[in-house]
Image (cartoon, grey):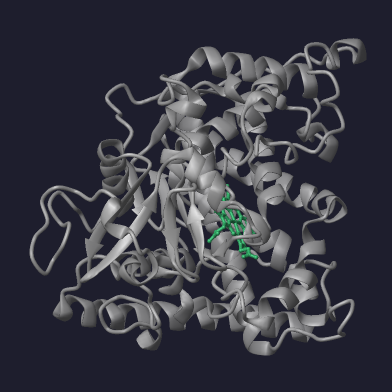
Amino acid sequence: MADTTTGTGLPKGFRSAEQGWPELERIPHPPYRVPLLGDVVGASRHTPLQDSLRLAHRLGPIFRRRALGKEFVFVAGAALAADLADESRFAKHVGLGIANLRPVAGDGLFTAYNHESNWQLAHDVLAPGFSREAMAGYHPMMLDVAARLMEHWDRAREAGRPVNVPGDMTKLTLETIARTGFGHDFGSFERTRPHPFVTAMVGTLTHAQRLNAVPVPFLMRRAARRNDADIAYLNRTVDDLIRARRESGPGDGDLLDRMLATAHPETGERLSALNVRRQVITFLVAGHETTSGALSFALHYLAQHPEIAARARAEVDRVWGGEEAPGYDQVARLRLVRRVLDEALRLWPTAPAFAREAREDTVLGGTHPMRRGAWALVLTPMVHRDPEVWGADAERFDPDRFAPQAVRSRAPHTFKPFGTGARACIGRQFALHEATLVLGLLLRRYDFHGEPRYRLRVTERLTLMPEGLRLRLERRTAAPTPSPADAGAGEEPGSALRCPVRGAGD
Ligand code: HEM
């Protein structure tokens, strides 16, 4: 299974920065380099991203690190990241962490190389599954899953127990993508331990991340065996799900129906059986882990900022009133709730880095020459904290940074939680609709209280998650039913029918 790596943790065909950056020596690196090992002082295999963030604070908008005998270039400044967003000169680079996922996801949408024909095929076949019409069809299923979460939280509250936020958000988002995409129920809320699919998935994500750390051959062999077992489990689960659908016949036009039966509108080509397996795994993994983190960080910040939670709650009461099941269009009207989410994704973009490569020889930011194929890793949390764009108080949680006027006054390509260009996130609208809906429902039902001694710690497994976050809940009394005249009061002009996804500040 590990045949896509070179045995050092590096993907086959890996291009180090020495080959692609002719003036590499002008790019700063950390001061204490250890012979053979490289920049390992202060590095942890558990928190590679947060290590890079610390280095970025010291080294500036572009820097390099040496590990595994190779040089890697990191971009942390907003201006350079905006230049890398120029699609005419740069494209997605499938490198390191993502390439390490190829044994499980192959040429699925997320891990496909740009030149692989299955990317365009799957993109064209699956993109209509994220249209407005498709999203409106998923909405009632999202409401059902959210209702299960709230029953679960009501029970915890009645028993006087705090809730495990990342654990429960992961149950919610896994059930949501499984139901809406594949008509499948993992029964997560009925389980006391995570579903084995989640355990296997976390195992492969963690393994993919660790492959990039300093290799320890004996540990790597053992980890590779465990990873093979995790991948075999993921494959079996997905194959069962596909077999069941083939036997039962088409569902209600969900993603799986599209994968199995839809031909490309121009070429008439269909996804192969192997590619369908890879896409299902891709969507189950990509479709829940990051949204779960986004919801968890947002809930953390709401618990830390009761004044913002109160404003957001007032918005939900005003827009939704006592209506039990808000309609699809009513989600887009929660402008402040959406800003809370954007601000949480600014500080902790849960897919925290993406790589870009030069399509041709070029000069990054007018200063750093790059040869064709040279690449850099964009550290989104640093781009989102660049004081040139976000001010001296960039570390402060302030959803009003996403008020329409503030968004309009910012340069383009400064907010990139969903990546950029042709390979940006296909599930962005899905994630934002789901997360805004769920935050609205939770704000309406509960007051949240953080544990007094909790300090935010972030776990990394390619994605980010607040570690050990627990909240105590208080049930609110029923929200008032507003008169129709009140319902729109206080909304921003023109917000009513706008999709919450568009115009998000990039
Ligand atoms: C808050 C939630 C989410 C975040 C922060 C997020 C972030 C990202 C980012 C940064 C990328 C680009 C990666 C790169 O350039 O290498 C990406 C791609 C992708 N995402 Fe998401 N994502 C989220 C939710 C979802 C959901 C809900 C789905 C599916 C339902 C999904 C499916 C995908 C897929 C398939 C790709 C690959 C697209 C392509 O290359 O054509 N994501 N996502």
On the rendered structure, is 359 left or right of 28?
A: right
Which quarter of the image is occupied by the N terminus? bottom left
The location of residue 413, given as percent across then percent down, is 60, 41
Q: Is residue 271 above or below residue 332?
A: below
The location of residue 145, given as percent across then percent down, is 66, 49
Q: Is residue 49 above or below residue 389?
A: below
* Closer to us: 442 or 152: 442
Give the tally of numbered discs.
0
Q: Is residue 115 visible?
A: yes
Q: Is residue 9 above or below residue 423?
A: below
Which residue sits furthest left? 35
* Closer to us: 162 or 139: 139
The location of residue 205, given as percent across then percent down, is 40, 65
Q: Is residue 473 visible?
A: no
On the rendered structure, is 66 left or right of 352?
A: left
**Residue at screen point 62% across, 32% down:** 411
Residue 494 lies in what quarter of the image? top right
The location of residue 319, given as percent across then percent down, is 79, 21
Which quarter of the image is occupied by the C terminus? top right
Residue 91 lies in what quarter of the image? bottom right
Residue 261 lies in what quarter of the image? bottom right
Which quarter of the frame holds ligand 1? Answer: bottom right
* Closer to us: 312 or 386: 386
* Closer to us: 296 or 364: 364
